[in-house]
Amino acid sequence: MIFDVHTHGWRYPDHFSDRFREQAIRMRGYEIPLDSTLEDYRAHCRTVPDRVKTVVFGGKAKLSGLWTPDRFIVEYCSQDPENLIPFLSLDPTQPGWQEELEEGHQDLKMRGVKLMPMYAGFYPQAPELDHLWQYAVRHQLPVLLHTGTTFIDRAPLDTTLPRHLDPVAIKYPECRIILAHLGHPYEGETVAVIRKHPHVYSDVSAIHYRPFQLYQSLMLVQEYGVWNKLLFGTDYPITNVDESLAGLRSINDQLEGTALPRLDPDQLEAMIHRDAGPLLGID
Ligand SMILES: [Zn+2]
């Protein structure tokens, strides 16, 4: 079984502002359609012999021009309720987020929360967010945050630093927190935070296409002894399950002919097959 903790349900371009699209094109040099469909996601799970469980969220960040209604995610997940787990999204800079939190959890039965501090322009440890963290603890909702850089020029980089989750985890030690993308390129901070806090994890989504950086990041993970805090994720539709697995499994290949230390292949496989459900309380 594979548990993909990080996928997006998006309708492209409806959920994105023109400015967001222009900046994505500026970064890549061409336009990538970010539409998500379950058929397409499943078509790229060929290398998984059995079951794939998948967390699905959209994203809300007014500042950057991204807004996916939670109901869209609920509808998406209704295609396979056994294996798709909907997370609600919040932009705490916008009025009404407290109501959206309650509606997503109580009415729409969503199972976790996705935050994008840098894209929306807020600090996750800000006192105004205490209600969110208290609510998440009280109702056992895991919170996944984008940590790491972006191509959006308006998004304030400082707000994305993994270290900002340290004060949150000190204040709310029972909260299940996932720092996305190993916090790239601030992986050192991510390792420091996940090592301290028993319920803080990181996902390895969408970083395999920088293989030497990923090698170094996972070597940090290995040397600090925190392999057990990593969760598999893809960031679909940015990339997919087959490509992510291939990228992770071939990560030592680039070291051929060198004396550099290898990443433990058993730990890599254990991470790929880690069942995030019980760890996050979303069995
Ligand atoms: Zn993502």
Image: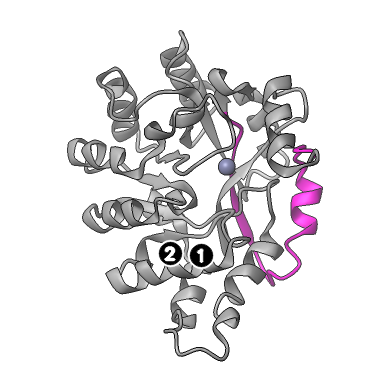
**Where is residue 181 shown, x and y percent of the image?**
49, 51
Task: Give above or below for 275 relative to 24.
Answer: below
> Between residues 154 and 233, which one lies in front from this camera angle?
154
At x 63%, y 61%, the residue is 209
Q: Measure the alpha-carbon separation of dots 1 and 2.
A: 5 Å
> Between residues 201 and 253, which one lies in front from this camera angle?
253
Callout 2: CB less than 8 Å from ligand 1: no
Q: Left or right? Give the position of 240 relative to 104.
A: right
Q: What's the residue type where badge 1 is placed?
A: Leu
Task: Let me know if residue 256 appears in the view.
Answer: yes
At x 64%, y 43%, the residue is 81
Residue marked by disc 1 = 214
**Where is residue 126 shown, x and y percent of the image?**
28, 23
Determine which quarter of the picture holds residue 217: bottom left
Task: Let me know if residue 1 appears in the view.
Answer: no
Residue marked by disc 2 = 217
Region of the chain picked out in magenta, as a range: 33-59
Tag 1–tag 2 contact (CB < 8 Å): yes
Task: Give above or below for 185 relative to 270.
Answer: above
Q: Which quadrant: the N terminus?
A: bottom right
**Where is residue 204 shown, x and y percent of the image?**
50, 57
Q: What's the residue type where badge 2 is placed?
A: Ser
Q: Mark 2 packing: few (<14 Cα in 10 Å), some, or many (20+)?
A: many
Q: Is residue 162 magenta?
A: no
Callout 1: CB less than 8 Å from ligand 1: no
